[in-house]
Amino acid sequence: MNTVSAEIVQTTAAEVPFQAASKDIWEKKYRLVTKDGTAVDKDMDATYMRVARALADVEETEEKREAWYQEFVWALRRGAIPAGRIISNAGATKYKPATSTINCTVSGVVEDSMDDILGKTHEAGLTLKAGCGIGYEFSTLRPKGGYVSGAGAYTSGPLSFMDIFDKMCFTVSSAGGRRGAQMATFDVGHPDVIEFIRAKREDGRLRQFNLSLLITDEFMAAVKNDGEWKLAFPVNERESKTIDLKDPEQVIWREWPSHKGYIVNDEGLVACKVYKTIRAQRLWDVIMSSTYDYAEPGFILIDKVNEMNNNWFCEDIRATNPCGEQPLPPYGSCLLGSVNLTRFVIEPFTERARFDWKEFRKAVKIFTRMLDNVVEINGLPLDGQRDEIKRKRRHGMGFLGLGSTLTLLKVKYGSKESVSFTERVSRELAIAGW
């Protein structure tokens, strides 16, 4: 195997010294220290070597472990930037054994029962304790005013249960030092959708959550055609005896993430009781006004997400990680990293300024192996999470510093040349990583 010595650093590319803010962030967020505050990582390079050693040690033989350690150190020095939990927690089990190298996850489906709601709260608490953010879909819970036969009462609705998750997240993150992060997604056809859209307008409510709507093709078509939009929720077997399943004014058949206890037809669609019918454009206006005035909720074209998912045949996506950039299936994990493009510019700000494509491709290939090795030391607390990440081994890689790189190359941002460069960077990263 060809290796690159850990001592060799590319000298032809621009070396920009770390700023004071960079060192401060490393010191507070990523530097490994003991319980009494003694530094384990003496400097940033020691952090790189700790991470590289932890990820290389999952290799099968001593020869491979040493060879990949050298490669990983080189890539980290060269501009490969793993996600924050990897930098913070890889190789740190001696000092913080209950932490994960995964930044974010998605919860399992929250079923419409008290047992499952409280069970998912427990799972979320363990996940947040490990240092991971988490996303959930809450439109699987029956709407406010729905009858709960077991309790002989009426439910307070999904928003009230979200308050439980919100308080749990605040408590766990306050105890652990790192602020928790959560995403709540909600179907645009749920009867409580307007309450969801306006939920955070109450002072102090759901402050540990980002909110996003699951927008379907069916809804977009209704908006475009100025049609009606039915707000509905699945009918269980007991309720089905009180309504006419063949009456389109009472029941609409829709895709649903859970079939448990519901009426399902031969096409896999679930019978949903219509609670209210409104103009689709009225709901659209409510969404757009809230997005403009309050910057929430987010807008997820969920049918397009599932259509473009490479794993469409074995999973149904209904939630995302807390920042919303990665849709994930139940118990899915957000394993990400970025490549700093500025590190590959040779002779910047000159007429000879150029991008080192060969070194870039090499860094991407090594970084791909590095991120895949994170799967083996994931540190996730739940069996479902560990099973999901090991079966599919999904990870994502992107790039950062695009604008700065164009400036170093003396290329105007937004010009045709900059667009061509961006397209090539994306293409080279995708092909080299594959």
Image (cartoon, helix red, strand yellow):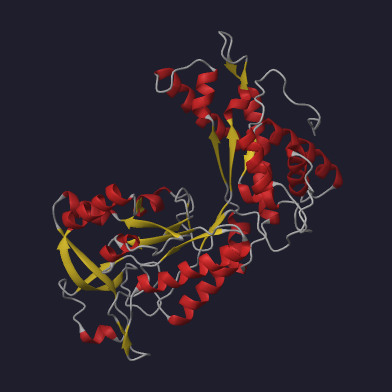
Q: How many numbered marks have been drawn onto this rendered protein structure?
A: 0
Q: Is residue 141 visible?
A: yes
Across and down, in percent, residue 340 comes to 59, 32
Residue 87 can be seen, yes or no: no
Residue found 75% across the figure and 26% down from its top:
9
- Residue at 75% from the left image edge and 37% from the top image edge: 45
Point 85% across, 42% down: residue: 63
Residue 384 lies left or right of residue 257; in this view the side is right
Instruction: Using the image as rendered, state which of residue 54 and residue 93 is in the foreground.
Output: 93
- In depth, the one of 206 and 274 nearer the eye is 206
Left or right, 27 with reference to 253: right
Quadrant (top left, top right, bottom left, bottom right) of the N terminus:
top right
Image quadrant in which you'd find residue 199: bottom left
Q: Position of residue 16 (x, y in %)?
A: 65, 25
Q: Is residue 174 above or below residue 91?
A: below
Q: Position of residue 21 (x, y in %)?
A: 61, 37
At 40% from the left and 53% from the top, the residue drawn is: 306
Is residue 357 shown above or below 282?
above
Q: Nearer the viewer, residue 168 or 123?
A: 168
- Looking at the image, the residue that sits furthest to the top is 351
Residue 271 placement: quadrant: bottom left
Q: Can you say which quadrant of the picture contains the C terminus? A: top right
Furthest toward the right, the residue is 62
